[in-house]
Amino acid sequence: MSNTKVKPVPPSRAKSLEEHQRDGTFRMDRHRDLLEAVDGTVAQWQARSVRQGGSMLPAEHFEVWCRQYIKHTVGRWFGEPFTLEPWQRTLVAELLAVGKDGRRKTRQALVGLPRKNGKSSLLSALALYFASIEGEHAPDVIVAAGSRDQAAVVFDQARAFAGSDPIIDLWFDQQRFVMKCPESDGLIRRIAADGKLQHGLNPSTVIVDELHSFSTPRQVELWAAMQTATGARELPFTCSITTAGYDKTTILGQLFKAAIDLPQLEAREDGSLLVARDDDSGFLFWWYHVPEGTDIEDEDAWMRANPASWVTADVLRQQLESPSMDVNSFLRLHCNVWTVTRTAWLPTGCWDGMLDATATPELGQTIYVGVDVGLVHDCTAVSIAWVRDNTVCVKSHVFSAVADVPAHEYYDTGRIDLEDVESYIRELADKYHVAELVFDPRFFERSAQSLSAEGLTVAPLHQSSAAMSDAYQEFYASAREGRIRHDGDPVLAEHVAATAAKQTPRGWKISKIDQSKRIDACVATVMAHWRAWRSVAEGGDEGFLL
């Protein structure tokens, strides 16, 4: 027998899951035991759900799963577990509630939340959950939005969440527009109305971000395609989370109206949360908002409508007082209140609140005149403004070549006679001291020259000028602060109500809410108000050339 000794081979140290994940050597077929050792496989988590015979209710299952595997990826909680807040826990319990037969009760949910309350994060976590461990066979989760940029918000957050934990990262194969979960044969994909629409899909879950934006034909088509595509699934689920809109003829508006009309509707939390469930159709309505008629300065109402702990009254106050935030945008985005129009200029009730039946100039009163001219099938407005007790009083007279618009004088010829407009201004000059007349020079240059030759001080004010931007800004600020008075003339009121505006880097951009409306009286009033108010700031009554 040989006495040769064999040198033992030292045992190799097995890599940990983290090491395999870090150097890219993990293979599911070889290293499944590493996942099982940390209780992190899709199958194990599926087994915990009530539909798979486990002890947890689906909402509890989702919450524990989020806390264990999802980490915040930005902000002050970066790297910390994604823990549901109490209001989110209550909402998820309703979204994932099951009946006695173990089937999910909700097939379609409409959730209304003001901006910055964590809508995208919650939707992203739900997308990962439904695509991996919820229990549907070969789940196909669609993240849909009205635009590619909006669809990317939820989808990219889901990708970030998947990369926040090594186990979840191993579950998903992340691609640019698709995430795949091989163990569940699941998918998450993003679709937008401004991209290529895809038919023939078979989604198990549809997640819609900002449904209020679905108004164009392509957006309506996308919604219809998603709603009809889930029919073959055992447990189809559509969850739309959105802020309020401004047009109740849209998809969101129709769903909102149907929800409000449900007999099961109940108001919770002092009316700041509307909840309704229709068991027959599987529809759930969950809507945080500031109730109609609430004072816009009511900070307690703001807080009830914004349930997230990180949204504070100070933050909302900063938004309301921001120069770039108009009142209607604040109401819609941060109070989740439906507004007449997305870009309405003056908030509801603002103009009516400045009514003063005594707002009539005395004979000899110093006034400022603004003229906005439209000739063919249009309106021309002559407005006056005068200073009284630290306010500016305004009044307008409208000439119209169109029969069905609010005006004081009508022309059945389809064209306004500018000589009549000039005569009206001369009548004003006979009664009052016209300190200055400002006008849009497009159609009124010759008339202005004639009036100037008669001794009136005139000045052109181009609609696209920086001075006009200042005029709009000062009118808006004065209206917000209640420094304007009017006599309640319904013609002027309709022109003001028809005025929409958008805040741009150069200031307000004015437009019509509807092309059938007229806003000439509002524009002329802004011009007259600007000169009257500036006369106070400049300390004199005389005009100047622009």
Image: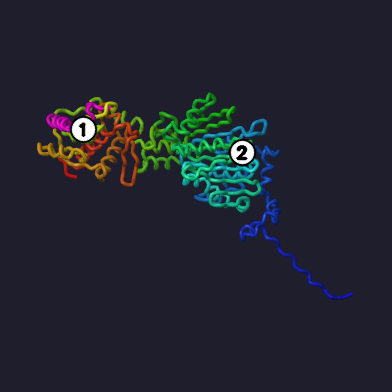
Packing grade of label 1 (10 A; few <14, some 14-19, many >=20) is: many
Residue sitting nearer the eye, 142 or 97: 142
Q: What kind of element bears circle 2?
A: helix
Q: Residue at x 49, y 43 (%)?
A: 192
Tell me residue 147's x, y (percent). 46, 44
Type of amino acid at the residue the image marks with label 2: Ala
Badge number at residue 391: none
Q: What kind of element bears circle 1?
A: strand
- Residue 488 seen in the current view: no
Residue sitting nearer the eye, 403 or 183: 403
Q: Residue at x 71, y 53 (%)?
A: 33
Give the answer, above or below, for where 410 lies relative to 327.
above
Q: Residue at x 23, y 32 (%)?
A: 394
Residue 510 magenta-drawn? no
Position of 295 with respect to 52 (left or right) is left
Residue sitting nearer the eye, 300 or 213: 213
Tell me residue 389's x, y (percent). 22, 33
Residue 424 magenta-drawn? yes
For marks 1 and 2, give the one nearer the viewer.
1
Badge number at residue 382: 1
Q: Are marks 1 and 2 in contact (CB under 8 Å)?
A: no
Distance in Å between CA atoms under marks 1 and 2: 64 Å
Name the image quarter holding residue 507. Answer: top left
Packing grade of label 2 (10 A; few <14, some 14-19, many >=20) is: many
- Residue 538 seen in the current view: yes
Residue sitting nearer the eye, 53 or 501: 501
Q: Which residues are magenta?
A: 406-431
Name the image quarter holding residue 396. Answer: top left
Q: Which residue is mark 2?
A: 59
Position of 304 with respect to 443 (left or right) is right
Quadrant for the N terminus, please: bottom right
